[in-house]
Amino acid sequence: MPASRVSSPVAAPPGDALAQRSTIRDVAALALVSVATVSRYVNGKQRFTPEVERRIAEAIAGTGYHAHPVARSMSTGRSGAVAALVAGVGSPQAAALVKGLCRVALAEGQDLICVDPLNGDSPLRELDRVLAMQVDGLVLAAPMPPDAAARLTQQRLPVVDLGASSALASGQHAQADAGALLVRQLVATGHRRFAFLACADEPDSPARLRGVQEALHDAGLPAPVLHHAQHATAEAGAAAASALLLARERPDAVIACNDPLAMGLLSEARRLGVAVPDQVSVAGIGNMPFGRYLSPPLSSVELHADSLGAAAMTQLLAAVRGLPTTAGPLQVAPPQLVLRGSTRLRY
């Protein structure tokens, strides 16, 4: 899969002849400072007096100069690019995670290469492709084979692994907690027969199902009736609706492994004549922004994926720059129930 690349804009458009001709010597001459001073300023290696920094900034703007990436790399020992391997970027949570990663990377002047290893020949091959790009650091938000650890150790590359023990509070444990939160709420409001709509296209579906199963076991209730959607989309949720909602022993609560599947269920329930939430409660996971506008509005779980991406990128860039990093889990808010009209009391 071709890597998508997000980068900060340069000082002048690529077609600007002045920007193509200008050099660091032009900036130094215009600012009345040495070439070394301009280099240290551009690469963030040294601060100068406000007057000197003002002259350099004005000279850069006036000439349209921007540092050549290769020259910058030779000067700083870094490429200025970091990478993220994110599984299932088509899912709302993965998209929110990438949004958080991008926001911090761009604010810090870093290029971000984002790759979905599920769309390539193999996760290991996609990892090798990214490592060959000489990136300065890597965020892992995708399951990787055992061989990946040896490659990363050999590279001595700063890595933030959202599935590793150092990030458990914001990784798979949070996914299981999301399913458990919904079950505990629904059980407390009188629901007893559960179904779970899973999907292999949703990377976190197994962890969310595990949370549902464990919470039902703790409540002394049967395991959920398990259905598998072909894809993690609203269309697939609608396709699964008849098997779930017209069954002889219809569940009184259906938890979908993500919001798009739940949205499809809601839409098809209306066509099938099944009242939500009067006859069955429906809930998703992920708290997609438009869930509140459905009819009825969708109950879900907020996973704070955008904040998780921002925290992961912040920690990665600190490690890349040799700054102190906080040991232990990333500091992200725990999953949060968002109750709306698609679930109800069943007493």
Image (cartoon, rainbow, N blue to C red):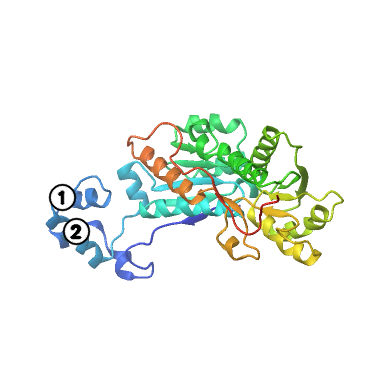
Depth order, front residue of 310/226: 226
Residue 164, given in percent of the width and then of the height, sits at 53, 33
Q: Position of residue 178 (x, y in %)?
A: 59, 43
Residue most extreme to the front = 347
- Percent across and percent down for residue 337 are 56, 49
List the residue tagged with mark 2.
56
Residue occupying image coordinates x 46% and y 37%: 159
Q: Is residue 63 above or below residue 24?
A: below
Q: Which is closer to the viewer, label 2 or label 1?
A: 1
Q: Is residue 300 visible?
A: yes
**Tag 2, which secondary structure?**
helix
**Does 259 appear above or below 317?**
below
Q: Amino acid at mark 2?
A: Ile
What amino acid type is highlighted by mark number 1?
Answer: Phe
Q: Quadrant of residue 68?
A: bottom left
Identify the residue shown where x is 75% and y is 62%.
275
Residue ID at (80%, 55%): 245
Choose the circle earlier in sequence order: 2 or 1. 1
Between 65 and 152, the residue placed more toward the observer is: 152
Viewed as shown, does residue 115 lie left or right of 38?
Answer: right
The local crowd at label 2, few if under 14, some if 14 to 19, many if 20 or more residues have their Cα within 10 Å, is: many
State the CA–CA distance, disc 2 to disc 1: 10 Å
Left or right, 219 with respect to 99, comes to right
For label 1, the crowd category at 10 Å Cα-Cα, with few meaning under 14, some 14 to 19 and many 20 or more, is few
Q: Which residue carries the number 1 mark?
A: 48
Q: Are marks 2 and 1 in contact (CB under 8 Å)?
A: yes
For image coordinates 39% across by 55% down, the residue present is 106
Nearer to the camera, 233 or 53: 233
In depth, the one of 266 and 319 nearer the eye is 266
Residue 120 seen from this side: no
Residue farthest toward the right in the current orientation of the protein = 248
